[in-house]
Image (cartoon, rainbow, N blue to C red):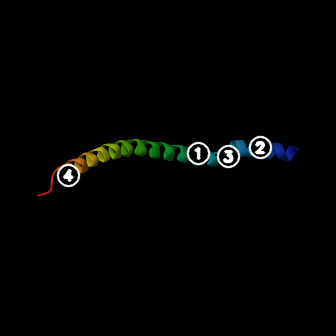
Amino acid sequence: MNNLLKNIKEFMSDEEGLTVVEYVIGAAMLVFGLTSIFGNIGTVLGDKLSDIVDAISTTSAP
């Protein structure tokens, strides 16, 4: 039982795992931000390309 308490105390005082968690949270925030930015740009570009394709398909060929 004493060994278990010792292991729990060592685990709670270990800060190395905290650093990993901080990196994971930072990476998740970066991915979320980039997805938000490029997701909106992709939607706008897709709409513009659809407009161009529609304009080309409605014009008559000579």
Horizontal side, residue 49 vs residue 24: left or right: left
Specify few, some or many for label 4: CA neighbours under 10 Å numbering under 14, 14-19, or 20 or more: few
Which mark's residue is nearer the viewer, 3 or 4?
4
| Label located before the other in sequence (2 or 1) | 2
For the residues labelled 3 and 1, the Cα–Cα distance comes to 13 Å
The C terminus appears in which quarter of the rendering? bottom left
For the residues labelled 4 and 1, the Cα–Cα distance comes to 52 Å
| Label located before the other in sequence (2 or 4) | 2
Location of residue 27 in the rendering, given as x and y in whole percent from the top left corner: 49, 47
Residue of label 4: 56
Which mark's residue is nearer the viewer, 4 or 1?
4
At 22% from the left edge and 51% from the top edge, which residue is drawn? 57
At 72% from the left edge and 45% from the top edge, which residue is drawn? 11
Q: Quadrant of residue 30?
A: top left
For the residues labelled 2 and 1, the Cα–Cα distance comes to 19 Å
The amino acid type found where label 1 is placed reads: Val
Disc 1 on helix, strand or loop?
A: helix
